Image (tube, coloured by chain):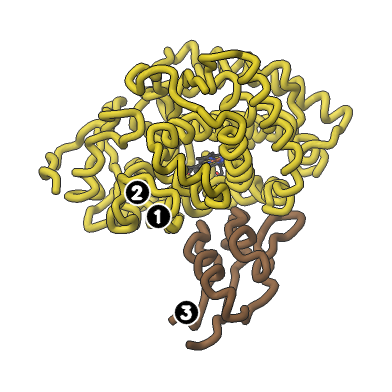
Chain colours: A yellow, B brown
Amino acid sequence: MTEAPSRRPAPLPTERATPLDPPTGLAPLREHQPVSPLAHPDGTAGWLVTSNALVREVLADPRFSSRSELIHSPMRTDPPTPAPRGVFIGMDAPEHPRYRKLLTGQFTVRRIRQLTDRIEQIVEQALDATEAAGQPADLIQTFALPVPSLLICELLGVPYESHEDFERWTNVMSSAGSALADAQAAEAALTAFLAGIVADKRARPTDDVLSGVIHEGSLDDEEALGIALMLLVAGHETTSGMLGLGTLALLTHPGQLALLREDPALIDGAVEELLRYVTIAQFDVGVRAALEDVELGGRLIRAGDSVSVSFIAANRDPDVFDDPDTLDITRPPGRHVAFGHGAHACLGQQLARMELRIAFPALLRRFPGLRLAVPLAEIPIRSEMPVYGAYRLPVAW
Amino acid sequence: MTRLRVETDPVLCAGSGMCALLAPEVFDQDEKEGTVVLIDDRPAEERRAAVLAAAERCPAGAIRVAGAD
Ligand code: HEM
């Protein structure tokens, strides 16, 4: 039991007791008012949804729109603007499914399985680089970032040599701590970089997702660029955050780590549990705007109100998960929403699953003595970023 | 226990691939659009758990199952 929170609009809870605990303010909200008034930093008021059932209800209801121009951020003050063409995460039907369907065929379970060997190679190379770096090694720089980054570059057909540039640009673009001018400059640089690549592929098609989208015929270069931008950003920070914090979760739960080492066949369930427990989509992902008045969990959401769903709170909901704050890699996966829910559920989820299912066991095999090289409190955490993660993860073995 | 009867809705389907991952003998995905293709609308008893899990975890609510209890 927790104490009942105030019913006045309050800012989004973000303070965590430890890096792997949810923000402490979420549990009382979920228990006492799972639809609670939210104060946005731009001065508007909105709503925060914290129970698993209501989060799923919002994400499945087309009366809650994803259109960027309607959505107020729970963390940022820049005004809502329409999604750039092609960036369908910020659109509704009919545009959203039209774009999305051009890509879903490239991310099927079968297509992703065909990448198994290549993912294994990339993972082994990253592990070689980790060993070569010597102890302590920063697992984010040697492993968690390069694996997804290289893979999404290859899939899209973007040269990996430029990864340091676009990783820096995407970081500045999405950080709640960036000045608006810096974020705009970073976005302009990334856009110019991708525009060059799209023009190249229009002229000389290669065998990759981006060329496929361009030569499918219905999109112009600006739309293809939007799609490339979204996939590049969505495809590397997320999986990288999961690889880093998933490893951290295992290292800080030695019993669970030992279980997985003894029985690698537990990996599929372990990945689902780590996705649930870590939940890297912290905020600014999963925000919707009501297109009409909607009653939700006994509260009246007015047309135009922005609604933030908390994937973190939904994934720790005791109504859906027994003992939700315990990491248990043998639990049934249940209704976790780490990849979202509804029409916008993560497009890359089978790719991400495959990366995680290959990468964690390979890491544990390579380093039987893997351990943190610094105390937990000294690990720098992306607390101001929509996609959660560790900036550095010093390890020894 | 009655045998399961499965229906899918390719229009609602978001192509997440959960069904093809969890119950590949019952669900496949269209090569081009990634949307659900139902292979077996009366799956055998031993597939019951996998089919129910696929329906529960479908993010788009595109799988309906009758005879679940
Ligand atoms: C562990 C890794 C990942 C996590 C936890 C994750 C999480 C999510 C979540 C929660 C959403 C829903 C956003 C919303 O409802 O507004 C989403 C959407 C999306 N994700 Fe992921 N993601 C991951 C990896 C990837 C990868 C590898 C890719 C690219 C290949 C990707 C591409 C996308 C795209 C394109 C969307 C937008 C889909 C749409 O609007 O229809 N994600 N992701």
Q: Sequence-wise, which precedes: disc 1 or disc 2?
A: 1
The residues tagged by marks 3 and 2 sit, at their Cα atoms, a distance apart of 26 Å
- Callout 2, which amino acid? Ala
Residue A39, image x and y in percent?
A: 25, 33
Specify the quadrant of the image occupied by residue A361: top right
- Callout 3, which amino acid? Ala
Residue A347 in sight? no
Instruction: From the image, tell me which residue sits under label 3.
Output: B68
A156 with respect to A32 (left or right): right
Instruction: From the image, tell me which residue sits under label 1.
Output: A56
- Callout 1, which amino acid? Arg
Q: Residues within 10 Å of mark 3 (few under 14, many from 20)?
A: some
Q: Are marks 3 and 2 on the same chain?
A: no
Q: Residue at x 39, y 42 (%)?
A: A255
Q: Can you say whether A30 is above or below A209 in the image? A: below
Q: Residues within 10 Å of mark 2 (few under 14, many from 20)?
A: many
Q: Residue at x 54, y 43 (%)?
A: A91
Tag 1–tag 2 contact (CB < 8 Å): yes
